[in-house]
Amino acid sequence: MIELENEKVINFSLCFIYACLVLFFTAHLPLPFISVLAGLCLWNAVITAKNIVKPNAWLANILAAGALGLMIFTIGMSDTVILFVAMLLLSSLFKLLQAKNKKHYQVITTLTFFSLSSVYLFSQTIFTTAVVSFLYVINFSVMGLLESKDNLKISAKQSSKLLLMALPLAVFLLLFLPKMPAFWQLPGPKLAKTGLSEQVDPFDIAKLSNSDELVFRATFNNPPPATPYYWRAIIHDEFNGNAWLASDFLKYSNQQTNQNLISEKSILIANYSVIAEPATQKWLYGLTYSTSNSKNVSANALGLLRKNSYQAKSLQYDVASYQFSVDSLNEFERNRYTFLSLKQNIKTNKFALQLKEQAINEQAFYDALLAYFVEQNFTYTLTPTPMSGDNTLDQFLLDNKRGFCGHYASAAAYIFRVAGIPARVVSGYLGGEYNSDNNTLTVRQYDAHAWVEVYLQNTGWTIFDATAVVAPERLNGSLSQNQELNEEFKNNLDFGLVSLSNFAAINWLRLELEQLDYQWSSWVLGFDQEKQNDFLKSIFGNKKSWMVPLVVLITAGLSFAIYFVYLNWPKAKPVKLPPIVKAYNEVFDWGNKNKITSADSLSPSQQLDHMAKQRPNASKELIEFKHLFENSRYANKPFTKERKTKAKDLIKLIKSSK
């Protein structure tokens, strides 16, 4: 059994790494299981700090079995990725709890590399990369400590040096190495980054305003179109009495691509690029009637965008958005968008029919309903009054008159259908925070919105959004920029930089970090095969098919040759000075900084006497240090811990003298 001299430092370093991992996975693992992991980290740290004997194998195995049972009970067996990560963390921490020799710690450091890499299954932001890179350096340092007697500082310095040397080569390979599909792949984790649902209950979307998680960023190729920006994601065409649903007709029957429906008469609104955050849902985001030629993205006849396959990373795609067509609906479509299976809201039914009698046409009905929301003093709120029962629309429309976007959309679509006017609820996002420096719009979860698309004769599908008259300021920018709802929004939001954006310095920092993260997402995470081909073509032109492999081979060969020379280059061995000599050099450097000049021929004792004469305020300490130096250097008295502490104290007094 090989014992370790610096086992305490190794234990503390590994405890720190796993404590950071536990903090990160708090958002992805159940709280009871996170508590177990945190307890194991703390237990390891206490054992190390107090030199307590580690638990025996029987106790550790019993605890491991209990923790494994808790893991399966709280996580389940359906999400294999989360289960894999949980087992990896649990096994590593229990192994650390029992580690007693070099071989044990070698296994743990190897597992730690896998544990750190698993973070990228859930987040690939620049902040995550920086933190994980720092933890990589610590783990490499631990590996160094297993093979040497150096301290952690020296080992970390060597690890950082090697990683920095490898960084240019890594960047080169990212740019020039051909992008190849993975030979095998884990299923993506079930990330709930997008909080939209195929069922719109008025209270569900209100809950999204609690979250400031990033959903997507859109960069316009030209100056952006006029606001408002309605980012469509899901259409809901079926009402069950309380909520609007996406029917099977929309989910499975409408597979016609919208590429066939774009004609020369179609009016282009905007061209832009979107970087969508990882999500398990397939829907994507686009303005009005959207189409895309990007890989892994398709569009249907409703102008909605979808992923062709799930993926656990950001997706960048190009979009072209057009105005809605004015083509007439066929009989099936008209029946579909006017159908109501339940009409339980009697007062709302009566109101809709009265409004229809007074309106001379569909456009007049549209205007009258919009005017009703203004005249009746409806208000927009992020904390709506709870409502229940079979007549929630009656309660909202005629009594409470306070609601979030979902309330207005649900009520308006119902009223249009009662009046025989085709209507559907659309959920997605409204607006976004615009950055003029890079022409980019940032959309977060709290920008979630629901509105109505109503079909008017001779006009086609038209957006109806009571928000336009109830809270017109909401149409421009992001919900976070709405002054009227600012206090309610900040109180409703989870803690984060956005919740502190009232402070100018914090808001500036937040915007700078978002700009940096956007560049990272666009140029590093989004550096796909298409971008690589454009980059290589700009450098090599039509010769890239044979020039790129040649450059890669030459660069790789030169890199290995340079590294080989670096490893074998004769290096002068550093002279290891005695501690008392290092202390004397520190005093001597102080004298030079304070312009206390003397002849180079003087001995160290004479130098200290000369300094004492030049600086009377420090003469006592200098003479005392001289005696300490002479006893240790010339009288061969051991430079003990007490004398080392005395020397440090004297140097501090000397430096603080005037």
Image (tube, rainbow, N blue to C red):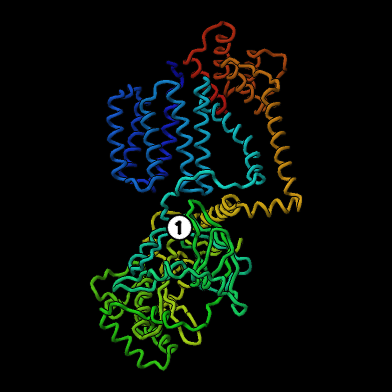
Characterize the local packing of mark 1: few (<14), some (14-19) or many (20 or more) Cα atoms within 10 angstroms: some
Residue 155 visible in this rendered orientation of the protein: yes
Q: Residue at x 43, y 80 (%)?
A: 454
- What is the quadrant of residue 447 in the picture? bottom left
Quadrant in which the C terminus appears:
top right
Position in image of residue 259 (x %, y %):
57, 70
Position in image of residue 561 (x %, y %):
71, 30
Q: Residue furthest top?
A: 635
SS class, disc 1: helix
Q: Is residue 158 left or right of residue 57?
A: right
Residues 261 and 654: in front is: 261
Can you say whether 565 is above or below 226 in the image? above
- What is the quadrant of residue 489 in the picture? bottom left
Quadrant in which the N terminus appears:
top left
Q: Amino acid at mark 1?
A: Val
Q: Residue at x 62, y 69 (%)?
A: 223
Can you say whether 546 is above or below 476 in the image? above
Q: Is residue 434 left or right of residue 249?
A: right
Q: Which residue is the site of mark 1? A: 498
Can you say whether 325 is above or below 305 in the image? below
Position in image of residue 319 (x %, y %):
57, 66
Position in image of residue 178 (x %, y %):
64, 46
Q: Residue at x 27, y 74 (%)?
A: 392
